[in-house]
């Protein structure tokens, strides 16, 4: 009898885990289904990767860290794939240069699809081969691999949006969904929990290592904006010559503005005195009520300064969200909108999860007591704890169930291709 059939027949918890594995792997394939083979080979900038590379790299993770060490007689699908699809794991070995992933015309789509099927089948075999105790020991690593794949699902949409935006045909990834247009809810400021607060993952369920250890922080009195900054509010910043006033900008931000010629958020364009925005559903007229998105940390910080406010710290964000019992639900990937939506009228905090990641003024550094794993997987987060800023909350392209209130996303201060927006804060 097939080993996975035996698991299902007796309700083994390995069957539940395997079903989750297969569901997340299928979601990746569903996401790439609208893309042609040509679309999946494009690399529009060094920070982005071709879609087919994401598909292969997430497969390589399971092959490298789970199958090769734990499944007897397993052989790598292709001896060179370890070099082609390793991302940054120095302990595993050398790798193809990241900026040159777009030159990999081979392997083609059919071979990458076969690679994914091969590894998926081997993972099912692993579940049926190992004893329950052995499987339980591997479960944290399997869960890490699944959350890693969910991160790449978001990157697939981020990266193809950037690539499509550079095409004069302005292709659409997905058809537009009819949405009710509404005015943005008024922005108010909500008092946060000043004093001694605890932040970081509490140990229940999965979390990335950078979310812990849980620890205490002291918060001076502060308030958070009830919603994200809108496109209309950001237009006022542009109209006030915000991109031309060096006093509003951090030094490195001002240098970047001058070097890159920024005059508006990424994907905005003004034609015939009307602003438009490129989305995953193609270009359309800018909706002033929706949250501004695709701004760098530098732009978020300059806007906050111009508005007489500041950005929140990540501790302020998390402590306030926890006190308000914010649930990890909102305009996320499963809605199929793939773009921020205007905030609905509500009392208190809105848009804390979904729509757009929220820049904080916190540098991405280790929490007190943080220790990365000693093996290759320890390279997952800790090695990036320099020259990055923390974002919180999730975006319209974040998989459902992926984020938590303790989740720490991070990007360089000049990055604009993430779905990143602005929430203001002020001292109380």
Image: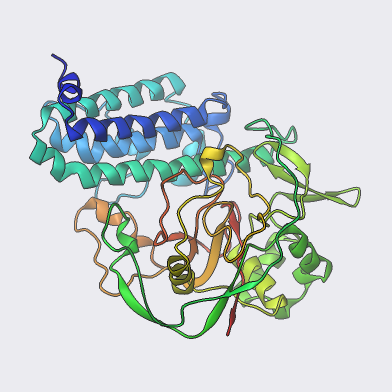
Q: Let me know if residue 328 appears in the view.
A: yes
Viewer-closest of 53 and 295:
295
Q: Which residue is pictured at 30% across the width and 49% down the height? A: 89
Q: Which residue is pictured at 24% across the width and 38% down the height? A: 64
Viewer-closest of 176 and 265:
176
The quadrant of the picture occupied by the C terminus is bottom right
Q: Quadrant of residue 96?
A: top left
Q: Identify the residue at the far top of this view.
A: 1
Q: Which residue is pictured at 75% across the width and 64% down the height? A: 233
Q: Identify the residue at the far right of this view.
A: 272
In the displayed structure, would residue 126 be above or below residue 87? above
Viewer-closest of 178 and 133:
178
Q: How is the image coloured?
A: rainbow
Percent from the top left, x then y, of residue 57?
37, 37
Determine whether, in the image, residue 41 is placed left or right of residue 119.
Answer: right
Determine whether, in the image, residue 423 is placed left or right of residue 264.
Answer: left
The quadrant of the picture occupied by the N terminus is top left
Q: Let me know if residue 96 appears in the view.
A: no
Percent from the top left, x then y, of residue 211?
34, 62
Q: How many marks?
A: 0
Percent from the top left, x then y, of residue 376?
24, 51
Q: Quadrant of residue 217?
A: bottom left
In the displayed structure, would residue 424 be above or below residue 88? below
Percent from the top left, x then y, of residue 170?
72, 35
Q: Which residue is pictured at 56% across the width and 39% down the height? A: 335
């Amino acid at each position: 009898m097939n080993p996975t059939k035996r698991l299902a027949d007796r309700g083994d918890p390995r069957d539940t885990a395997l079903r989750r594995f297969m569901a997340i792997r299928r979601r990746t394939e569903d996401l790439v289904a609208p893309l042609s083979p040509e679309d999946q080979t494009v690399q529009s900038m060094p920070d982005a990767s071709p879609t087919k590379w994401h598909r292969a790299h997430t497969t390589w993770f399971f092959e490298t860290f789970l199958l090769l060490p734990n499944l007897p007689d397993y052989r790598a699908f292709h001896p060179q794939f370890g070099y082609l699809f390793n991302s940054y794991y120095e302990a595993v070995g050398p790798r193809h240069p990241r900026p040159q992933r777009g030159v990999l015309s081979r392997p083609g789509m059919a071979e990458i699809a076969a690679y994914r099927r091969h590894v998926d089948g081997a993972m099912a075999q692993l579940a049926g081969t190992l004893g329950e105790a052995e499987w339980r020991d591997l479960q944290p690593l399997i869960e890490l691999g699944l959350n890693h794949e969910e991160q790449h699902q978001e990157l697939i949409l981020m990266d193809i949006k950037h690539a499509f935006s550079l095409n004069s045909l302005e292709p659409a990834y997905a058809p537009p969904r009819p949405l009710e247009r509404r005015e943005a809810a008024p922005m108010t400021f909500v008092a946060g929990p000043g004093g001694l607060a605890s932040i970081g993952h509490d140990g229940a369920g999965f979390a990335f290592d950078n979310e812990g250890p849980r620890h205490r922080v002291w918060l001076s009195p502060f308030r958070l904006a009830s919603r994200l900054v809108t496109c209309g509010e950001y237009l006022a910043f542009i109209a006030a010559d915000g991109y031309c006033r060096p006093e509003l900008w951090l030094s490195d931000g001002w240098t970047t503005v001058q070097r890159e010629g920024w005059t508006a958020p990424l994907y905005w364009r003004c034609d015939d005195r009307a602003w438009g925005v490129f989305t995953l559903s193609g270009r359309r007229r800018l909706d002033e009520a929706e949250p501004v998105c695709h701004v760098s940390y530098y732009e978020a910080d300059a806007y906050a300064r111009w508005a007489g406010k500041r950005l929140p710290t990540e501790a302020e964000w998390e402590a306030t969200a926890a006190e308000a019992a914010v649930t990890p639900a909102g305009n996320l990937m499963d809605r199929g909108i793939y773009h921020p939506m205007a905030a609905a009228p509500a009392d208190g905090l809105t848009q804390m999860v979904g729509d757009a990641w929220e820049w904080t003024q916190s540098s991405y550094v280790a929490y007190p007591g943080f220790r990365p794993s000693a093996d290759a997987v320890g390279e997952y987060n800790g090695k990036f704890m320099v020259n990055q800023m923390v974002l919180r909350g999730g975006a319209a392209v974040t998989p459902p169930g992926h984020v938590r209130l303790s989740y720490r996303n991070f990007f360089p201060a000049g990055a604009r291709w993430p779905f990143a927006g602005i929430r203001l804060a002020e001292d109380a």
